[in-house]
Amino acid sequence: MMSRIKRNKCTLKRRLILWVLMTNIMLVLYCLMNSTQVKIRDSQQDTCPLSISKLKENVSKPSQRREECSPIVDIMFMKTHKTASSTILNILFRFGEKHNLKFALPDGRNDFFYPSPFLCSQVKDYRPGECFNIICNHMRFDHQEVAKLLPPDALYITILRDPVDLFESSFNYYHRAVPLTWRINGENQLTEFLNSPETFYSPQAFNSFYLKNLLFFDFGFDNNLEADDPRVMRGIHDLSKRFDLVLIAEYFEESLILLKDTLCWTTEDILYFKVNARRSSSVSHLTPELRAKALQWNGADWKLYQHFNATFWARVEVYGRERMKQEVNELRRRNTEMKAICVEDGDAVEAQKIQDRRFLPWQPVGESSILGYNMKKNVHPTFRTLCKKMLTPEIQYLSDLGVNLWLTRLWGWLKDLTWIKNIYN
Ligand SMILES: *[C@@H]1O[C@H](CO)[C@@H](O)[C@H](O)[C@H]1NC(C)=O
Ligand SMILES: *[C@@H]1O[C@H](CO)[C@@H](O)[C@H](O)[C@H]1NC(C)=O
């Protein structure tokens, strides 16, 4: 009995020491990376003047494409957190590779120094005046900086999700990386937090933006504004001028159809397998009272979401409800077909069951709740490449595109070392 208590104490101490060590290493690295960034910044101010490439007219023109448009290749996708945006990323990566487009990629890690505001100098191999086709990794949005990298007629696209579900997802995914939540006692930290957020939240605290109006933060605004602050509506109007298409995660298939229509792409371009899904037992369900509290707590995001949910459906109306229904059915049919062709056992599986590490998705700190896929062994050669690309998680895909992810990998290694080894053993 005594020795057991002692051992527990020991484990606790060891965990604590490792945590402190890890946090320090990360902070030092972070500062180093940020300081090199600032230096580069001073040396450039140029902008991107012209459209750099349009797809040649006779490059792959499938029959179902309407004659009057040619596919759009200059795209800014503002990748928001916890919104199914990784699935869109896979689609963009595939399209870009297929057409030899030039990506503005991050350097050393899988985002543009998030949560620091975006600077064009954060782009891998950036030289002043250089232009790109697609920029789509996590960033804290800054339109002026993004505009330096893309032709002026590039399309701006993003995706939103119901702020309550987003908050819940963000809380569960990031809470171990937000020191504010460490002192919340009890079984259900999320409930405790929502019952008195002011007790546990401080705007200045490290990583606190993960816990309040994360969408607003991602778009470069102040995430601590009250919902009725006039700056909230002003921000929303800025975004509606800036973005050509705002997708809604709750209507993911309809979103992809609008995307296809706006970009003049084909159904094949938007085929997908859902990536980064959580295992259902790790998805909690909030009671109506807690939902109301989460909405109020994330009031700015709620306004943002409502605004763009309305514009989304107005667009569906213009597109045609019946036509939308047919297109969604066709997309579902094609996706099911691809799943049967590519995926072993027909669906996503737990991380532990993934045999090939290249298909193993990134996991949150301290758990392995994100599902992934096994690729069938004997996929027909015609589909082999497409299957592989559709199943490749974001981090591995970035590696394939030539990003050296040393910082992300180091973080992953430390994370596994401290959590997997100490908690599960
Ligand atoms: C387009 O088609 C023409 C004639 O078929 C051919 O000469 C040209 O090389 C093609 N261009 C590309 C980019 O494939
Ligand atoms: C989004 O719009 C649809 C269609 O108008 C509506 O049914 C739905 O309730 C809206 N969702 C929210 C959260 O406002």
Image (cartoon, rainbow, N blue to C red):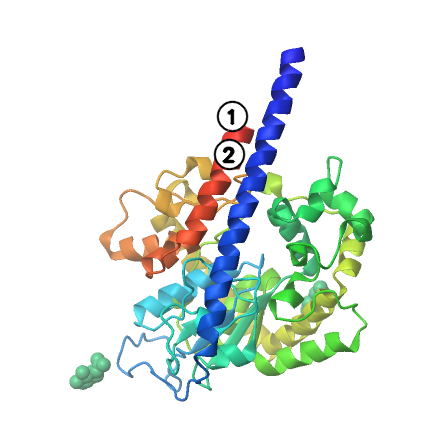
Residue for point 51% across, 78% down: 145
**Relative to 343, is 292 above or below?**
below
Q: Is residue 1 visible?
A: no
Q: Residue 87 has which mark?
A: none
Which quarter of the frame holds ligand 2?
bottom right
Q: Amino acid at mark 2?
A: Ile
Q: Which residue is mark 1?
A: 425
Q: Amino acid at mark 1?
A: Asn
Residue 51, horizontal then vertical, whole percent: 38, 86
Marks 2 and 1 in Cβ contact (< 8 Å): yes
Q: Note whether ligand 2 is within 8 Å of mark 2.
A: no
Picture quadrant of residue 223? bottom right
Q: Secondary structure at mark 2?
A: helix
Q: How would you rate the neighbour count of disc 2 (Cα within 10 Å): few for under 14, some for 14-19, many for 20 or more?
A: some
Picture quadrant of residue 59? bottom left
Residue 184, horizontal then vertical, whole percent: 74, 41
Along the line of sight, the residue nearer the viewer: 406 or 75: 406
Residue 230, horizontal then vertical, whole percent: 78, 78
Q: Secondary structure at mark 1?
A: loop
- Which residue extends farthest top? 1
Q: Earlier in the sequence, mark 2 or mark 1?
A: 2
**Relative to 354, is 3 above or below?**
above
Q: Is residue 48 visible?
A: yes
Q: Residue 420 has which mark?
A: 2
Q: Is residue 125 left or right of residue 413?
A: left
Residue 153, horizontal then vertical, whole percent: 46, 86
Q: How would you rate the neighbour count of disc 1 (Cα within 10 Å): few for under 14, some for 14-19, many for 20 or more?
A: few
